Image (cartoon, grey):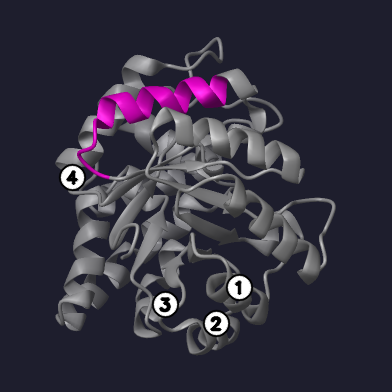
């Protein structure tokens, strides 16, 4: 059974101006996501900025979201690290906190071989009982899970159940779909590729856009899966300008500004990330106004 089907939000972590976590804003965002029919919440994924958070902050954030969601929809914790031991440790802690699953990015910077990736994921999976979604985003990590490696992990490791594919390589994703049918659930990791990946047998998306448009992203996936592909495609195409604006600078800089423009959180980033440039803020605001988001 799939960990979730539909649109899961890659939730931002709102900060106060002094860069401490804004739990009041975070609670409001969680409630808004549930009201908007989001199918799962991913906490401390890339969009949640765990790279600039302490381990204590990551644990606190995961605990807070688990408590506020209170079993209404699945909560998936981002527990990746470029040290397998560290990934095991935080994965075990997340399991203790009551999350429903884990999103584990490939090791970054140290560039594991395909055998190293296999052993990395196998070791993490054996340390927990939770279902695991692998996360392939080579543009950020410098490391690509090949379809053969992903398929092997899906076949041989019981609780590795899915993969978030953000390689942007449709040929690779097609090969993955061919090898992994019935073995791994495929989720789009790019908001502008949801329909193409669903057409290859994907069952959902882990989405940045859902932070701002949860209902629309949920509807896009569900309409497609339920057979109304024309309506799903309409949502995808109408959202493209906004999606491109959300990635005009490195994620999550633009999406935090989008939420700020809606009065939902401060646009505060922790260095080395900085706030959206004035030029790109104009572009983002125009895209949002075009969709009636402001």
Residue 10 lies, with reference to residue 4, above or below; the image says: above
Name which of mark 3 and mark 4 comes first in the sequence: 4
Q: Position of residue 19 (x, y in %)?
A: 56, 15
Q: Position of residue 199 (x, y in %)?
A: 35, 84
The residue nearer to you, when weighing 156 against 277, is 156
Q: CA distance from mark 4 to mark 1?
A: 32 Å
Q: Which mark is residue 100?
A: none
Name which of mark 3 and mark 1 comes first in the sequence: 1
> On the image, numbered disc 1 is attached to which residue?
150
> On the image, numbered disc 3 is attached to which residue?
197
Write the start and end of the magenta stretch as one range: 57-73
Q: Position of residue 160 (x, y in %)?
A: 51, 62
Location of residue 55 (image quadrant): top right
Marks 4 and 1 in Cβ contact (< 8 Å)? no
Query: Which quadrant is the N terminus positioned in?
Result: bottom left
Magenta span includes 58: yes
């Amino acid at each position: 059974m799939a960990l979730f089907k539909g649109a899961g939000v890659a939730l931002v972590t709102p900060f106060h101006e002094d860069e401490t976590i804004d739990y009041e804003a975070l609670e409001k965002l969680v409630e808004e996501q549930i009201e908007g029919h989001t199918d799962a919440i991913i906490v401390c994924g890339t969009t949640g900025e765990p790279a600039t958070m302490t381990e204590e902050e990551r644990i606190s954030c995961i605990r807070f979201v688990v408590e506020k969601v209170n079993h209404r929809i699945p909560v998936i914790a981002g527990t990746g690290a470029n040290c397998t031991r560290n990934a095991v440790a935080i994965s075990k802690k997340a399991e203790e906190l009551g999350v429903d699953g884990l999103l584990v990015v490939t090791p970054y910077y140290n560039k594991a071989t395909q055998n190293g990736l296999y052993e990395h994921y196998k070791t993490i999976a054996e340390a927990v009982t939770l279902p695991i979604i692998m996360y392939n985003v080579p543009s950020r990590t410098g490391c690509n899970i090949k379809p053969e490696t992903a398929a092997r992990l899906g076949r041989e490791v019981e609780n590795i159940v899915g993969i978030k594919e953000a390689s942007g390589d449709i040929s690779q994703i097609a090969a993955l779909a061919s090898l992994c049918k019935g073995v791994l659930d495929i989720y789009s990791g790019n908001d502008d590729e949801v329909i193409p990946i669903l057409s290859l047998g994907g069952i959902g998306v882990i989405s940045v856009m859902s932070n701002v448009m949860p209902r629309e992203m949920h509807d896009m996936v569900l309409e497609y899966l339920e057979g109304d592909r024309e309506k799903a495609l309409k949502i995808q195409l109408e959202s493209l300008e906004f999606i491109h604006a959300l990635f005009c600078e490195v994620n999550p800089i633009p999406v935090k500004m989008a939420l700020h423009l809606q009065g939902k959180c401060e646009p505060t980033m922790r260095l080395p990330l900085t706030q959206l440039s004035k030029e790109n803020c104009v572009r983002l605001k125009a895209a949002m106004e075009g969709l009636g988001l402001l």
